[in-house]
Amino acid sequence: MSRGDSDLVVVGASAGGIEPLLQLVAKLPGDLAAPVLITVHVSASGRGALPSMLERAGALSSVHARDGEPLTPGRLVVAVPDHHLLVAGATVRVTRGPREHHHRPSIDALFRSAVAARGPRVIGVLLSGALDDGVAGLAAIARAGGRVVVQAPQTAAYDSMPSRALEVVKPDAVLEPEKLGSGLVELIGDRSAGERGPPGPDDSLPAALGPSPLRCPECAGVIDRLPVHEDRCDG
């Protein structure tokens, strides 16, 4: 399987998401056949200790993202505090674009870029968190024919993100934290994901509402009103 045709795993978490993320990583094998990109909402001034925590939890190496580095199967790549983690082709991008949902890094930004780069080869995972960052991105993954995994809301410290995701998408799996890793391994390399192609339109998703009267306080760009209650700056 060529690098450009391989699976790409993207994981998003916010409040209460570190513990299930550690449990997920603990079950991933050292020869995992996919890169894993991780965005967690952290303080802009944080020390960025997450990569070392993840590396201690399991068998995979873990690093903070570096702009332009190639996607490497079997490696955990973690968003840098106060920077978006994106995918461009077969490489990682690190940017300081406008915040989304008041967050930088943004889960939706990672998920959307992954879909643009890999289409149905993307596997999206959404863990515990407040509000709904990542929900629109998860819907984009599903529309492209990718796989969707959601933490069981009743096991989440903050169930808003996984609960909202289940209102919007039909996931391939809803799993308790201790089963996330093994469930993910089952999906990786499943060629039927790429063969099934994008599904038809999902009438359960609301139509885009167009530009809002608001402007981004950082760059003064017009803010679009997007589905699933998402605002995004065009600047």
Image (cartoon, rainbow, N blue to C red):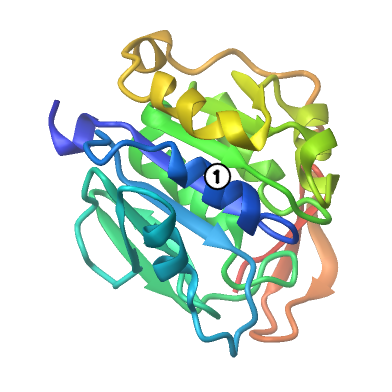
Q: Nearer the viewer, residue 39 or 200?
A: 39
Q: Is residue 142 above or below residue 103?
A: above
Q: Position of residue 182 (x, y in %)?
A: 47, 26
Q: Secondary structure at mark 1?
A: helix
The residue pinned by badge 1 equals 23
Q: Is residue 203 above or below residue 93?
A: above
Q: Is residue 113 above or below residue 198?
A: below
Q: Nearer the viewer, residue 60 or 122?
A: 60
The quarter in which the C terminus is drawn is bottom right
Tag 1: residue type?
Gln
Q: Position of residue 29 (x, y in %)?
A: 31, 36
Q: Is residue 102 visible?
A: yes
The residue at the point 42 percent across, 33 percent down is 122
The residue at the point 23 percent across, 67 percent down is 68
For disc 1, the neighbor class at 10 Å (few under 14, some 14 to 19, many from 20) is some
Q: Is residue 95 left or right of residue 173?
A: left
Q: Nearer the viewer, residue 143 or 44?
A: 44
The residue at the point 63 percent across, 74 percent down is 42
Q: Is residue 53 left or right of residue 161?
A: left
Total numbered badges shown on the rendered structure: 1
Question: In which image quadrant can residue 1 be found?
Answer: top left
Residue pushed farthest bottom?
45
The residue at the point 59 percent across, 62 percent down is 40
Q: Is residue 8 left or right of residue 41?
A: left
Q: Position of residue 123 (x, y in %)?
A: 46, 32
Q: Is residue 144 visible?
A: no
Question: In which image quadrant can residue 61 be found?
Answer: bottom left
